[in-house]
Amino acid sequence: MSITNMPKFMSKTPTVKVEFNRQVLITNAFPNGYNPLTDGQITFSMFGIHNPISTAVTESFKIAIYYEEGVNEVTRYIGPGITFQATPSDKLSLKVTLSEKETGDKLSKLLIEGETEGSIPIGQGSYLELYMPPAFNVTNSDRVESSCTAVSGFSD
């Protein structure tokens, strides 16, 4: 993980330690102290953080400044939760084919093939939803349910 855009009052060479893949400790962050009246806003960036794997709202970020590592808290953020909600990826590549292409009352086998592009993980037990356009009609849901094969290409 790297930190950039450090303001002049923040250390140009802080010690950054990541614990438990979630807790970032920045020591020597303010080598000359910090005065909001003269130093302005605290702003910095961190790279190397993976986004959440779903669109669920995350737990709140917790931010505090300590005089010493983990002790003698100076200040902390107590305002409304700082949460993040990812947007769904549109990196799903699909191909849909029908065994019968004639119009009319033909029963057809629907084959769906595809993959996610890049490194979009799909968690175990996830659901797959298929919405069929109004031009298609499922007249025998029991038959569709019993003939649907398992989703292949994944391993537990």
Image (cartoon, rainbow, N blue to C red):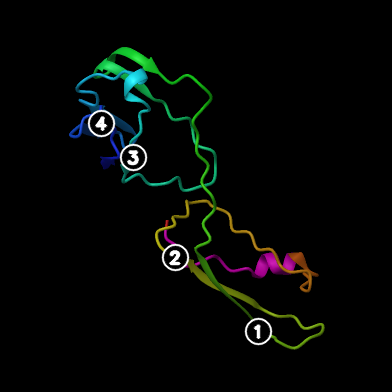
Query: Closer to the observer: label 4 or label 3?
Result: 4
Residue 116 in the image: above or below residue 6: below
Report crowding for label 1: few under 14, some 14 to 19, many 20 or more residues within 10 A (C-alpha): few
Q: Counting residues from the N terminus, which is met first, the one under dot 2 or under dot 4?
A: 4
- What segment carries the magenta color? 142-155
The answer to which quarter of the image holds residue 108 is bottom right
State which quarter of the image contains the C terminus.
bottom left
Residue ID for mark 1: 99
Circles 4 and 1: CB atoms closer than 8 Å: no
Q: Counting residues from the N terminus, which is met first, the one under dot 3 or under dot 1?
A: 3
Residue ID for mark 4: 8
What distance separates the C-alpha of mark 2 from that of mark 4?
41 Å
Query: Closer to the observer: label 2 or label 3?
Result: 3
Pick the residue in front: 4 or 47.
Answer: 4
Residue ID for mark 2: 117
Amino acid carrying label 4: it is: Lys
Number of dots carrying numbers: 4
- Residue 23 bears which disc, if any? none
Amino acid carrying label 1: it is: Ser
Q: Does the segment drawn in magenta span residue 144?
A: yes
Q: Secondary structure at mark 2?
A: loop
